[in-house]
Image (tube, rainbow, N blue to C red):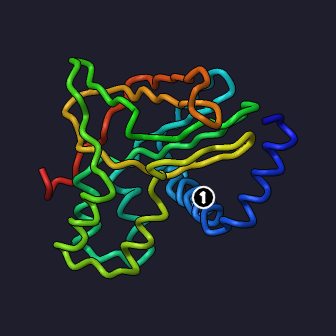
Amino acid sequence: MNLTTLRHTHLSRKIEHWPRYTAITGMALCCNLLSVPAAWAAERNTYQNNGITFSISVRTPDQIRAFYTGRGFPEAAIRELESRCLLTVGIQNNRQDIAWLEPSNWQLITEHGARVARVSRDELAARWEALHIPLASRATFGWTQLPESRDLYPGETAGGNIVVVPPGEAFTVTVRFATGTDKQGTPVTLQSSPLTCTDLPEAQK
């Protein structure tokens, strides 16, 4: 498939699957909103390799509370999120072929080699159910999360949060993108510098 055909297919997909693109816009908005006010801005590290641009930052409990309180989240949901570690991720595919966003293939490892556990969408959904979180809040939370699987066409971007269990030490994130329409292209790998989850609120320690 040549680049012209790929771009034509991409445009057709945008029209046919419009909800997907509004979701991406929503997640990008989430990333921007979580970066303000300036006093709360977390350091965002950006990496590039073989046409993929990847950025990542750790959200503070203050940022989490401010953002979700402003969207009407109940206190129980906010406290649950404050007890976790939220990583805000941004990705842009500047390649001439498809790059596959699949966070399940990423590795989060502490400085002593321990695996950092991700909290899946299904786990969070079960938690929201147990806490009787309103459906509207669950939907809002959903569009702030990074997709579990997405084929990124040339020039396409994606962004959102992933939720992890806070480790007690610094950790790195190694991301891997399969490439090509059939995922048979040369994979692209990037690794973050060490990240540290911020302290939990005093009431939750």
Residue drawn at point x = 24 percent, y = 58 percent: 123
137 versus 10 height, above or below: below
Please tell me which residue is depicted at 27% across the width and 56% down the height of the picture: 82
Q: Is residue 105 left or right of residue 123?
A: right
For the N terminus, the image quarter is top right
Dividing the picture into quarters, in which one does residue 182 lie? top right
Q: Residues within 10 Å of mark 1 (few under 14, many from 20)?
A: many
- Determine which residue is flagged by label 1: 24
Res 96 quadrant in image = top right
Where is residue 33 shown, x and y percent of the image?
Answer: 55, 60
Q: Position of residue 101 (x, y in %)?
A: 52, 41
Residue 28 locus on image (x, y percent): 60, 56
Of 37 and 125, the residue lying toward us: 125
x 53%, y 60%: residue? 30
Total numbered labels placed on residues in the image: 1
> Horizontally, is 84 left or right of 188 in the view?
left
Q: Amino acid at mark 1?
A: Ile
Residue in the picture at 55% in, 23% down: 187
Is residue 4 left or right of 116 when viewed as pictured? right
